[in-house]
Image: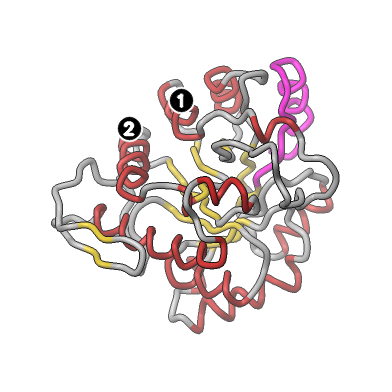
Amino acid sequence: MRIATTIFLTDETIAPVRLARELEQRGFAGLYLPEHTHIPVTRDTPYPAGGELPPEYGRTLDPFVALGQAAAVTEHLGLGTGITLIAQHDPIDLAKQIATLDHLSGGRFTLGLGFGWNVEEAADHGVTWSTRRELGRDRMALMRALWADEPTGYVGEFGSVRASHAHPKPVQEPRGPVSGPRTLIGGAAGPKLFAHIAEYADGWLPIGGRGLTESVPVLRAAWESAGRDPKQLQVVPYAVLPSAGKLAHYAELGIEEVVLQLPPAGEAEVLRTLDDYAQYL
């Protein structure tokens, strides 16, 4: 089982370059970074985990800039977002960022995407909350048009692009209906999410990794009903606080990668946590 990590990197935590080097030297499989552009002070949306929103949410580094630094000082470490708030991005700009990072890293990028929870943050980006999932699906289709080998246009419900010269291209080869980098969708289990995963992704990023005994068979059924190869489905539990029993259970479910949560802390605390997590490598 591959053991990757995630962390809220901020202006107060360990630096991306230092962390990436330590992860690769210690044998961890990857680094995934979350995204929040800003957190409005006036907010009616409750924090999904309950209680007060942790301060690191309003201090996160831009994941693509930070992962670019990580790519420059590593050779094998996987690089991913967990998650890119796809509805909040211009898809033409985002397609360029993703293709550039995948190109410069030699095909090491994983696009973890999701639809968010903070209504006020999304509204400041012009997102209508009720249509954010359909908007995200549309933006993925537009980006894949730009990633196509030949100039390809796209006209969708929410956006369009002319057939264009758009380089670099992502390094990774198409996988069934999926082109571009490995794509995993985050979110709570449900028929709508699972239909989207089966349509245009490589798998699921279930945050916390709970309830997988019941939900993974449902996802597999949706995946196979869409005509996808059962062997290609990837389920990657995300932001997991590990234990030997938990990881053994994931292995029994056929899971091949787990993303462990690191504290949003300074260098000393993060490195101590990596020392603790080394037992799972």
Look at the image and give the residue range highlighted in magenta: 259-281
Look at label 1 and name its amino acid: Thr
Image point (84%, 52%), residue name = 245
Look at label 2 and name its amino acid: Leu
Instruction: Please state the horizontal and vertical placement of residue 276, each as a whole percent of the image.
Output: 79, 29
Instruction: Please state the horizontal and vertical placement of residue 64, each as a whole percent of the image.
Output: 45, 34
- Circle 2 crowding by C-alpha within 10 Å: few under 14, some 14–19, many from 20: some
Q: Please check the rendered image and state whether residue 274 is part of the magenta-colored stretch, yes or no.
A: yes
Residue 194 numbered tag: none
- Circle 1 crowding by C-alpha within 10 Å: few under 14, some 14–19, many from 20: some
Q: Please check the rendered image and state whether residue 220 is part of the magenta-colored stretch, yes or no.
A: no
Which label's residue is closer to the chain start, 1 or 2? Answer: 1
Image point (37%, 34%), residue name = 105
Image point (50%, 84%), residue name = 225
95 up-or-down from 137: above or below: above
Q: Quadrant of residue 267?
A: top right
259 up-or-down from 275: above or below: below
Q: Which residue is mark 1?
A: 74
**Split into 4 quadrants, where in the image is the C terminus?**
top right
Q: Which residue is mark 2?
A: 104
> Does the magenta stretch mainly form a helix, a strand or a loop?
helix
> Which sits in the foreground, 52 or 272?
52
Marks 1/2: CA–CA distance: 11 Å
Q: How many marks do you count on the picture? A: 2
> Which sits in the foreground, 95 or 204?
95
